[in-house]
Amino acid sequence: MPSLEPGLVFHDLSPANGEGLKYARLEKSPQGKPVALQTAVVRMVPGDGSPDIDYVDLVGAVHIGEHRYYQQINGLFRRYDVVLYELVAPRGTRIPRGGGKNHSVIGNLQSGMRKVLGLGLQLEDVDYHLPNLVHADLTPDEFFESMARRNESVAGMLGRAWLAGMGRQRSPKALANQMNLYRNLLSGDSDKALKIWFANEMVEMSTMQHAIEGKNGSTLLAERNRKAVQVLRQEIARGHRRIAIFYGAAHLSGIQKLLEKDLGLVPAKIAWLNAWDLN
């Protein structure tokens, strides 16, 4: 896809508001109406004893978004020496242009959702053939070896996610979101109502990592985050100074903590990209 310069506007972060950052949010109008689902770009800069780099940008991803959003992502990627991206796949895998075929349950679900909502798909719209993109995730063998070492199962991870979701559904915020869905459906614009509801759900899911992880972390999030930071160290050692980590929004608070603890980087700036137009 053609790229667009994203025109990012960064805002300074103080040490106080750098704690507990969210990497996805619902932007609202002055009247309180949802106007966009947004993902964050958080700039981490060297602190005392940090490696000799300019910055590491944590670029939040959603797997379903506006085509224009992914065009902006493609344009943004060209600003970096290297971009580290997530994908549980064998080393050397290159995602075919257009995304190829994905017949997994999750792939079919995402494809169905994007058709209903009239959106694009990350694996189809992001240009993974840009020369500065570097795979920074577990291979399938590493993923399942980690699961075995941790005595994890796919069913167990799905069960934790289901329980976390069930607990959230009883919260006042979730109930208010459901009431808004019913109200918007009754207004006659069902497509917009569903899109706003899904956007709310995606923001909430991006903050549920602690419930899904449990006290000991998990392969799904923690181990993959560690892999991303391991590859980041390798790229820093190669002399790259302007680096991005392009991972799902649910991963990035964990990666941020690793960068703070292990590399001494600190969050300095934040910018937002419109992933879904809710107008």
Image: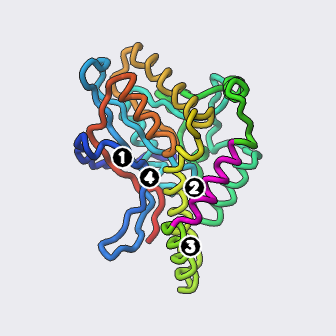
Mark 1 lies on residue: 5
Q: Is residue 258 left or right of residue 47?
A: right
* On screen, residue 156 above or below 224: below
Checking the image for residue 120, the label placed there is 2
The answer to which of marks 4 and 3 sits earlier in the sequence is 4
Residue drawn at (41%, 14%), measured in percent from left and top? 238
Q: Residue furthest front?
A: 215
The amino acid at mark 2 is Gly
- The location of residue 177, given as percent across then percent down, is 52, 70
Q: CA distance from mark 1 to mark 4?
A: 21 Å
Q: CA distance from mark 4 to mark 3?
A: 19 Å
The answer to which of marks 3 and 2 sits earlier in the sequence is 2
* On screen, residue 72 above or below 80: below
- The location of residue 264, given as percent across then percent down, is 32, 24
Residue drawn at (37%, 35%), measured in percent from left and top? 57
Q: Is residue 200 magenta?
A: no
Mark 4 lies on residue: 24
The answer to which of marks 1 and 3 sits earlier in the sequence is 1
Q: CA distance from mark 1 to mark 3?
A: 36 Å
The answer to which of marks 2 and 4 sits earlier in the sequence is 4
The amino acid at mark 4 is Ala
Checking the image for residue 200, the label placed there is none
Q: Is residue 66 left or right of residue 72?
A: right
- The location of residue 147, given as percent across then percent down, is 70, 29
| Residue 255: quadrant of the picture | top left
Question: Camera-side residue: 132 or 224?
Answer: 224
* Residue mark closest to the camera, 1 vs 3: 3
Residue drawn at (45%, 60%), measured in percent from left and top? 37
